[in-house]
Image (spheres, grey):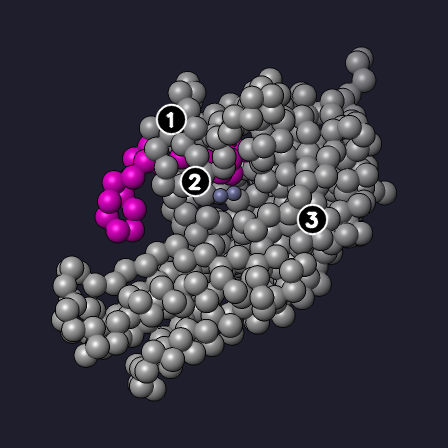
């Protein structure tokens, strides 16, 4: 009799062929945020087969009656810690241009009724496949761990709201509240086989802000009889640039980007209003509050200086539903997780990764006060030869959300599941 495969590495290799089939199927059939019915069903079926008690359609969206396709799979193995492992399910409205034989040809209508291509351009198919692989391996290694593992298939990450919807539907009351929350994301810069780790803040808090600058319109030739909201908006935008440079401690990362501005409709008419849409990125709660307050104060101050009356002050609205908290990797858990992954994959395979101002609603699972220690790591997805070539020539590799982003599936999934399995085993070892 041959010895049964025992290490996460050996077991990952044994599972890989069937996982690749699942991956290619998921990749060819991506679904937009909140529409993840098929993907959720595959995750649910595979978690069941791996030995989980599975509940489907977990989640209640804040402002929508849409079905929430959240999946919860519970794997019990006696007394011990509760560890949550999360993967997200959704694709993006991008037409795939990778040329892969399993490329998505899916077209659908978006909420505005326009036809769009759909693609797993953020690699959430890698996340789902790694989750399934991790569940299979841990289901077979029960003699090595104790406690409860909660596997999560989370919808609507790209549009934000899926994690919040699952929490709102009792994720932490109907099921055991986790002692640790774990997640991974594929990485479009790191070479496959390696894992990037960031300690502390790794993704920013994201706010969407709508600003309406009011004016008093009139003829373009008689500006003195009007209050021009276009000139005022220009002043406000420039003044906002002093928030980061003059008002916030230079050691606190802050971004204020005006992504959209619209006002007026003809050369010679001064309009009544200019509308702007901003994305605001910060890490710390106190910095976020200060930046949002500054945005409003500066807008009102400039309007006042332009001579607008109180009832024509700018209206600043922060979209509460669109808010994503900052993702904070608990330093102690991160060190422990990195050590476990180094032991499993090799010292040189785990590298330090710089934080970014991107956003991730995985942060919701750690709760606003970060009272549930969380750890999200980045799994390299780039062909090592291409990564080396890009380094030499300075060429830009396709980024996440690009129509040309294509992970090399085999080493990426293998590394992701070995990494995740070894972190879970370390936290739950007998
Ligand atoms: Zn994304
Ligand atoms: Zn993503």
Q: Which mark is residue 97?
A: 1
Residue 221: x %, y % from top left: 15, 69
> What secondary structure is found at the residue carrying circle 1?
loop
347 drawn magenta: no
Q: Nearer the viewer, mark 1 or mark 3?
A: 1
Q: Residues within 10 Å of mark 2 (few under 14, many from 20)?
A: many
Q: Quadrant for residue 269, please give it.
A: bottom left
Residue positioned 40% across, 41% down in the render: 92
Q: Residues within 10 Å of mark 3 (few under 14, many from 20)?
A: many
Between residue 421 and residue 379, name the one nearer to us: 379
Residue beneath disc 2: 91
Task: Report whether 80 appears left or right of 12.
Answer: right
Residue beneath disc 3: 375
120 drawn magenta: yes
Q: Quadrant of the N terminus?
A: top right
**Residue 95 in view (yes/no):** yes
Residue 314: x %, y % from top left: 35, 75
**Vertical position of residue 394 compared to residue 208: above or below:** above
Q: Is mark 1 within 8 Å of ligand 1?
A: no
Residue positioned 43% across, 78% down in the render: 301
Do the numbered discs 1 and 2 sit on residues whose CB atoms are within 8 Å? no
Q: Quadrant of the C terminus?
A: top right
Residue positioned 39% across, 54% down in the render: 259
Residue positioned 38% across, 26% down in the render: 97
Q: Earlier in the sequence, mark 3 or mark 2?
A: 2
The residues bearing labels 3 and 2 have C-alpha atoms spaced at a distance of 23 Å
Task: Report whether 39 appears left or right of 227.
Answer: right
| Start-end of magenta stretch | 106-126
Between residue 284 and residue 375, name the one nearer to us: 284
> What secondary structure is found at the residue carrying circle 3?
strand
Q: Which mark is residue 384?
A: none
């Amino acid at each position: 009799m041959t010895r049964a495969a025992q290490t996460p590495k050996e077991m990952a290799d044994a599972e890989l062929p069937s996982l690749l089939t699942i991956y290619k199927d998921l990749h060819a059939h991506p679904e937009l945020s909140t529409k993840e019915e098929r993907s959720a069903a595959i995750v649910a079926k595979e978690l069941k087969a791996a030995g989980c008690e599975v509940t489907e359609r977990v989640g209640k969206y804040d402002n929508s009656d849409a079905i929430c396709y959240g999946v919860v799979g519970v794997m019990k193995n006696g007394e011990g810690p509760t560890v949550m492992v999360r993967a997200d399910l959704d694709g993006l409205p991008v037409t795939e241009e990778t040329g892969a034989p399993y490329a998505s040809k899916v077209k659908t209508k978006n909420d505005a009724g326009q036809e769009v291509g759909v693609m797993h351009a953020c690699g959430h198919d890698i996340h789902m496949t790694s989750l399934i692989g991790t569940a299979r391996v841990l289901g077979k290694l029960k003699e090595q761990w104790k406690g409860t593992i909660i596997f999560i298939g989370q919808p609507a990450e790209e549009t934000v709201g899926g994690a919040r919807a699952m929490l709102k539907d009792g994720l932490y009351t109907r099921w055991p509240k986790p002692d640790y929350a774990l997640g991974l994301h594929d990485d479009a810069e790191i070479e496959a086989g390696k894992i990037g780790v960031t300690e502390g803040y790794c993704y920013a808090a994201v706010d969407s802000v709508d600003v309406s600058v009011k004016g008093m319109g009139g003829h373009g030739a008689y500006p003195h009889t009007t209050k021009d909201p276009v000139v005022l908006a220009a002043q406000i935008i420039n003044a906002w640039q002093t928030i980061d440079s003059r008002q916030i401690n230079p050691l606190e990362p802050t971004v204020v980007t005006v992504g959209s501005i619209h006002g007026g409709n003809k050369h010679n008419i001064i309009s009544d209003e200019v509308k702007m849409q901003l994305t605001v990125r910060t890490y710390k709660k106190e910095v976020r509050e200060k930046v949002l307050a500054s945005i409003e104060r500066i807008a009102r101050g400039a309007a006042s200086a332009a001579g607008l009356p109180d009832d024509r002050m700018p209206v600043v609205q922060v979209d509460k539903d669109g808010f994503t908290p900052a993702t904070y990797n608990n330093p102690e858990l991160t060190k422990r997780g990195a050590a476990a992954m180094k032991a499993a994959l090799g010292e040189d395979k785990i590298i330090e990764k710089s934080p970014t101002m991107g956003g991730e609603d995985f942060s919701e699972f750690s709760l606003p006060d970060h009272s549930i220690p969380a750890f999200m790591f980045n799994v390299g997805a780039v062909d090592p030869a291409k990564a080396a070539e890009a380094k030499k020539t300075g060429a830009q590799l396709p980024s996440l959300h690009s129509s040309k982003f294509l992970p090399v599936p085999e080493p990426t999934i293998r590394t992701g599941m070995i990494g995740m399995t070894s972190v879970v085993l370390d936290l739950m070892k007998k």
